[in-house]
Image (cartoon, rainbow, N blue to C red):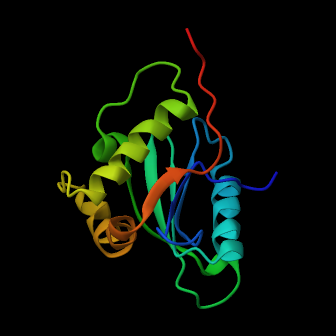
Amino acid sequence: MPLRPDIVVTRPDSPELLLVVEVKRNVADQKSTEAALKSYMVHMSCPVGMLVTPEQVRFYRNRYTDYLPQTIEMIGECPTGDLLGTLPRGAVTESDLERPVEEWLESLRVGGDRSWPAAVREAIESSVLPLVSGGIVRAGGPRWRRAG
């Protein structure tokens, strides 16, 4: 099944993708999910990607050296809690993860907390922050939430 990112950052005046975020509750096959994200980034000519699980956040950069997913490199990773704070315990759904990720990206736009983990500081400052500052953060598709 092709990847459909959960969160995207686009230019305010065009649908051009600047950042794609894939949120997974449970990554049984992380290599496969990572490969799908990289393929999507190449196909959509997207410069930056993130893979978020309850355990860790990974940042990826497309340096446009070739049109192959293998040319996209991981530029940083850290525990999710270190970046987003405490997540709900128990059965965390993907929408439970999407909300804090989207809020974190939005906080970057307005100059929120910048005490990022050292392992990802460079990735955020050089790749994520410039794109989010001038872009629009939005859901990558419809979100269904259980009522009641």
**Residue visible at 52% across and 85% down in the picture:** 63
* Viewer-closest of 10 and 69: 10
Measured as percent of width and height from the top left, residue 121 is found at 26, 65
**Residue visible at 49% across and 40% down in the picture:** 98
Q: Point out the residue furthest to the right here.
A: 1
Vertical placement of residue 65 versus 11, above or below: below
Q: Point out the residue furthest to the top here.
A: 148
- Quarter containing the C terminus: top right
Vertical placement of residue 70 versus 38, above or below: below
Residue 54 visible in the displayed image: no
Measured as percent of width and height from the top left, residue 105 is found at 37, 53
Measured as percent of width and height from the top left, residue 141 is found at 65, 46
| Quadrant of residue 134 within the rendered picture | bottom left
| Quadrant of residue 41 within the rendered picture | bottom right
Vertical placement of residue 67 versus 113, above or below: below
Residue 22 visible in the displayed image: yes
Horizontal arrangement in the rendering, residue 35 relative to residue 130 (left or right): right
Q: Point out the residue furthest to the front here.
A: 13
**Residue visible at 59% across and 48% down in the picture:** 6
Q: Point out the residue furthest to the bottom here.
A: 65
| Quadrant of residue 67 within the rendered picture | bottom right
Horizontal arrangement in the rendering, residue 106 relative to residue 19 (left or right): left
